[in-house]
Image (cartoon, helix red, strand yellow):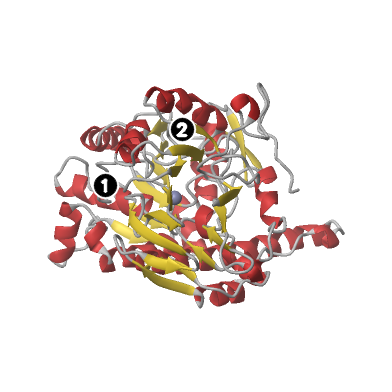
Amino acid sequence: MRLRSLGAALTVTGSAHLLSVDGGVAGAQVLFDCGLFQGEAELEARNREAFPFDPAELAAVVLTHAHLDHVGRLPLLVRRGYRGPVYCTAPTAALAETVLLDSARLQVEGYRHALRRARREGREGEVPEPLYDEADVHRTLDLLRPTLRFGDTARVGPLRVTPGRAGHILGSASLLVEHAGERLLLSGDLGNRGSGLQLDFEPPPPADAVVLEATYAGRTHRAWPGTRAEFADVLRDSVRAGGKILIPTFALERAQLILATLRDLMESGEVPRIPVFLDSPMAARATRAYFEYGAELVPPVREALARGEDPFRPSTLHVVPTGAESRRLHRYDGPAIILAGNGMMTGGRIGHHLRCHLGKSSTRLVIVSYQSPGSLGGRILAGAPRVQIMGEEVEVRARVHTIGGFSAHADQDDLLAFLASTGTPRVWLVHGEVEVMEGFLPVLAARGLTANLMPDHHPVDPLTTTFPGGRPPGLRDGDRPVRVRDE
Ligand SMILES: [Zn+2]
C-alpha cells in the first residue's frame, strides 16, 4: 500500500487520502474523502490546484462522513473527469446532498458578489470562476453508492473495506481497508464519547497501521453532564443580561445537538423559555435525516423519536427561512437565542448578527465548535479587541464563552481508547494542527506505539516508511509547515 495525503496532512482541513495498491496491470488508486479546504485564504487557494492524479483513472472514492471538509471537493473531482462510484453509508449520502448543494450555492453567490464588486472597480477579469455549481453537484450525487453498512465488508476495487461507527456525526465511519494481507485503519473523524447525541464509536479491529485524526489530541473535554450544566449556567446568565445569545453553529450535528439540549433544558425548567431562532435553513433540512437514522443516536433522543416527538424542537423554536427575515431579527427586542452558520464565522448569516450585536456588552457569544486560528471565530477567541466583519470594524464587547464539551471530535482520552483495541499499529496523525500533533507523539510513544505526522503530498508505505531525522518532509524545527510540492 502507498498512501498519499492530499489534504488534512499537517493541517485540519481538506481531507483527501489517495491509496495506491498493486493489482491488475496498472494497479489501482482509491481516494478516501475529497474535502474542501476551509479557513485562511492561503488554505482555500489550495481548492483550485489540480489533483495530482487523473480523476478519470481512479478506481473508486470512499467517504468517511458528510462534513464539507471531507466531501466538498467531490463535485470538482467530477467536473475534472471522475465518473466512478462514490461509496458511503446511507446517512452520509443523505447529508452529503444537503451539504454539497449548499456549498454550490455559496460558491455561485460568492462569485456573483465578487464579480459585482470587481465590475465597479473595472477588474472583472480577475474574479475566479466558482469551483463548481449545482449541475456539478447533481452529477456527483448520481455517483453516490450508499451501500456501506457498519460491520459489513464491501469490495471497493481491489480493496476490502469494513466501516465501523465513528460516533462523530450521523453516518460517520471509520474504515478498515484490507489488501494482500495488510490492514490499514482510517479513523475518519472520531466522536467525543458520551456526547448528548451520537452513540460512541465502536472499538475498531486490530490493524497494522492507523491513520488517526488528531484535532483535539492535546485536550480533555469536560464530561457531558458538566457540559450540559455549563451551558445552562451560560444561558441563565445571558437571559439576565437581557441581550442576544449568538451560537455560531455548523448545520450538521452541532445544530441538532444544541437544539436537543435546549429543548431538554427548557422542558426541565432549568432554563427560561426564551425564543430560539434557527437561522439556518440548511440545519433544518439536515435535521430530517436524523429522523430517518435515529438508531445511531443516544437513547433519550432515540426514544423521543420513537414516541413520535421532535427532540430537536424546543417549544419556542422559529426557523428563519430567508435572508431578509434573518436581517429583520435585528429589530427583535429582548433576550433570544440565535443559532446561525457558519460555525467558524467565516461566512453565512452569523456574520450580520455578529456585526449587529458583538459591540454590545449584553450580548453573549457561545462558541460550541472548533475555531481555526485564522478564522473570525479564532481571532475573537484569541481576544482581539476589534474585528472586521463584512467590511466593517466592530469592537468586541460581548462576553465570549467556549463550551468545549459540545465538540464533535474525540479528545486525547477518546483517541487513546480508540487505539486500545487495534494492537500495536504504526500511527499516522492527520487532521490536526502541527503543534498539537507533535505534542501527542510522546503520549503515543509512551504506549509503545510508533507514530508520526502524515506528510503533505508525500507518499508513504503506511506499514514501513520512516524518515531521516524522524520528522516528515515539509517540517523543519521552528518552521511553519512547508508544503512539499508535487514531484
Ligand atoms: Zn467531521
Quadrant assignment, res 422: top left
Q: Is residue 203 left or right of residue 5?
A: left
Q: Nearer the viewer, residue 213 or 58?
A: 58
Spatial CA span between label 1 and label 2: 35 Å
Q: Amino acid at mark 1?
A: Asp
Q: Is residue 179 left or right of residue 195?
A: right
Assess disc 2: are there few (<14), some (14-19) or many (≥20) residues with their C-alpha within 10 Å of its C-alpha: many
Look at discs 1 and 2 and give the one toward the viewer.
1
Where does residue 113 sit, x and y in percent of width and height?
69, 61
Quadrant assignment, res 301: bottom left
Assess disc 1: are there few (<14), some (14-19) or many (≥20) residues with their C-alpha within 10 Å of its C-alpha: many
Residue shown at the point (22%, 43%) measured from the top left: 272
Q: Is residue 186 above or below residue 23?
A: above
Q: Which mark is residue 161?
A: none
Q: Which mark is residue 398?
A: 2
Counting residues from the N terminus, which is met first, the one under dot 1 or under dot 2?
A: 1
Where does residue 293 sit, x and y in percent of width and height?
27, 65
Where does residue 294 sit, x and y in percent of width and height?
24, 62
Q: Is residue 444 visible?
A: yes
Q: Nearer the viewer, residue 217 or 119?
A: 217
Q: Residue furthest right?
A: 122
Q: Which element is circle 2 on?
A: loop
Q: Amino acid at mark 2?
A: Ala
What residue is pinned by disc 1? 200
Q: Which element is circle 1 on?
A: loop
